[in-house]
Amino acid sequence: VQLQASGGGLVQAGGSLRLSCTASGFTFDDYAIGWFRQAPGKEREGVSCISANNGNIYYADSMKGRFTISSDNAKNTLYLQIDSLKPEDMAVYYCAAHRQGYGCYGRLRYGMDYWGKGTQVTVSS
């Protein structure tokens, strides 16, 4: 299982970014997939995930509104659209996958089995 996030960069506050995650070695039909982030000096936090069995989408409560997760299963690619970026969104964003494909909401707290290298999002005020 391999995951690689991309699309990060330097953005002004109020701007938008679309992160991508290319995956290989598994299919989105079988694994839950999601996004996490970790800011300097802070613990990792879950952003959003998609369950494999029914495609249900979950967001961490603090991430509702400006974050949109989506996937292209044919391309095994996961996306995260971030709008109205704030300085507090600055973090390394990681994509992840979990072998237990259903009910991924709890994984936003406890993490997933497989992790990709992250992509840095920097927000200037």
Image (cartoon, rainbow, N blue to C red):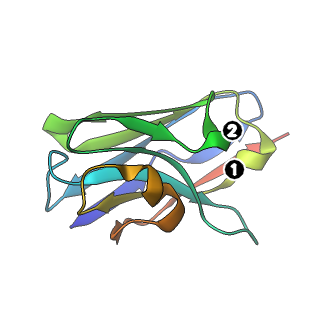
Q: Amino acid at mark 2?
A: Val
Left-right relation of 54 to 69: left
- x and y, in percent, of residue 56 in the image: 33, 35
**Which of the two labelled residues, at mark 2 and mark 1, occupies the earlier sequence position?**
2
| Residue carrying label 2 | 11
Q: Amino acid at mark 1?
A: Thr
- x and y, in percent, of residue 39 in the image: 69, 62
Q: Tell me the quadrant of the picture where the C terminus can be found.
A: top right
| Residue carrying label 1 | 122
- The answer to which of 72 and 53 lies nearer the viewer is 53
Q: Residue at x 23, y 63 (%)?
A: 99
Crowding at label 2, few (<14), some or many (≥20) Cα neighbours within 10 Å? some
Q: Given contact means CB atoms under 8 Å apart, are the residues at marks 2 and 1 in contact?
A: yes
Q: Residue at x 15, y 45 (%)?
A: 29
Callout 1: helix, strand or loop? strand
Crowding at label 1, few (<14), some or many (≥20) Cα neighbours within 10 Å? many
Left-right relation of 106 to 23: right
Answer above or below: position of 110 versus 31. Answer: below
